[in-house]
Amino acid sequence: MFPKIMNDENFYNKDVTREEWQQGLSQDDHHRSGIRFARRVRLPRIFGLAAMFFPIAGALVAQAPPGGWWLLLVGWAFVWPHLAWQLAYRAADPRVSEMNNLKADAIVAGVWIGLTGVNVLPTAALIILIGMNTMGAGGIRLFTAGAIMTTIAALVTLQLTGVSPGFTLTPLELWLALPVMVLYPLFFAWVSYQTAIRLAEHKRRLELMSTRDGMTGVFNRRHWEILLRNEYDTCRRAHREAAILIIDIDHFKSINDTWGHDVGDEAIIAVTRQLQLTLRAGDMIGRFGGDEFAVIMSGTPAESAIAAMSRVHERLAVLTLPCAPQVRLRISVGVAPLTEEFCHYREWLKAADVALYKAKNAGRNRTEVAA
């Protein structure tokens, strides 16, 4: 009846859990992750490239390049961000596609640096923009690759166009570039902050999903056993009393077979609710799957645990299910106080399970204590 206890040595082995996680990551999950990555880059690129149009245009005026360069600048600043998003969104691997887009940004930035004659502030603004984007998206590796590509593209452009590096600075270029250098880091920080908030909320939800039973909201079996192991160790060190309870809904299979699984689910939720209403906030309730529950009552002797279960029995005796008033919910409970005889928390858990068998064999709808 009692499910096989999890293997601590396997569960707490980091290599095993990492391998299982990687195996569980499906292709769809990888694709969705790539889409989210491309979406995070999209807004900074739209804002950054549009803002860079003005300082680059101000620096190009002095060079008087052919009209094709102006068309390229307009396309890069206002069209490319949306095209890059579409390329990543429609790609088989959006993350790889977006990484390539970031490298393309770095190359084109090098072209503008070369074409403007390494004009001081537009060059600095471009380096800040591209550096923040590549570092934020791919860390030092992508940042280094982007810096190399930008440098090579700038040198090649200088060689092909014959523009001489001037390292010049005019008041117009100053006023056009300074807003970008001030506002873009602030905008990038705001986007990063929003991403951090979403990731923190996502992490909180994942932690909740990994520790809680989806139907009842109490701890799932795996996490409950972690709590039990910790409680066992703490109580042994502090010589503190504790008791655990294993609870089973009587004739649950008959309820499912007669009234259907919807009523069975409602019965499970009803029992959970009564346990939550009766027990203390610090008592740790877990669901082992099916119709079995378990409770850790810290600092509680067996007599207090029995008294608490008596109140649960009384509440269930007058409880009716809205969708099946004829159903009478009853539970059998096995209680095991912590003693010095237990050399491992599994022995403690087994003692509660034996007490539950004793309650069932004695006619059910009762609470029995481990001998």
Image (cartoon, helix red, strand yellow):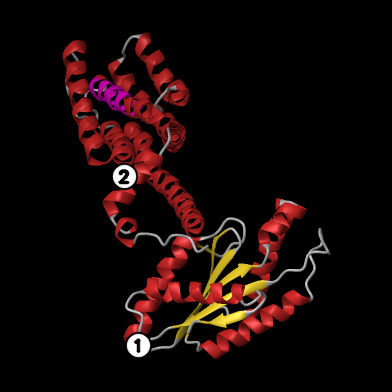
Residue at x 35% of width, y 88% of height = 238
Amino acid carrying mark 1 in the image:
Ala
Which residue matches tag 1? 238
How many other residues sit within 10 Å of disc 1, few (<14), some (14-19) or many (≥20)? Answer: few
Q: Does the magenta run of residues contain 111?
A: yes
Up the image or down, 257 lies above or below 34; here it is below
Q: Residue at x 37, y 25 (%)?
A: 97
Q: Is residue 107 left or right of residue 264?
A: left
> What's the residue at 32%, 21% (across, down)?
60
Q: Name the residue: 27% across, 41% down.
A: 139
Name the residue nearer the viewer: 4 or 289.
Answer: 4
Q: Residue 201's x, y, as percent?
A: 49, 54
List x then y, in percent, for residue 126.
30, 32
Query: Can residue 282 be seen at all in this image of the molecule?
Result: no
* Vertical side of 19 occupied by 256: above or below: below
In the image, residue 185 sits, relative to residue 230, either above or below, namely above
Segment colored magenta: 101-114
For label 1, the SS is helix
The amino acid type found where label 2 is placed reads Glu
First along the sequence among labels 1 and 2: 2
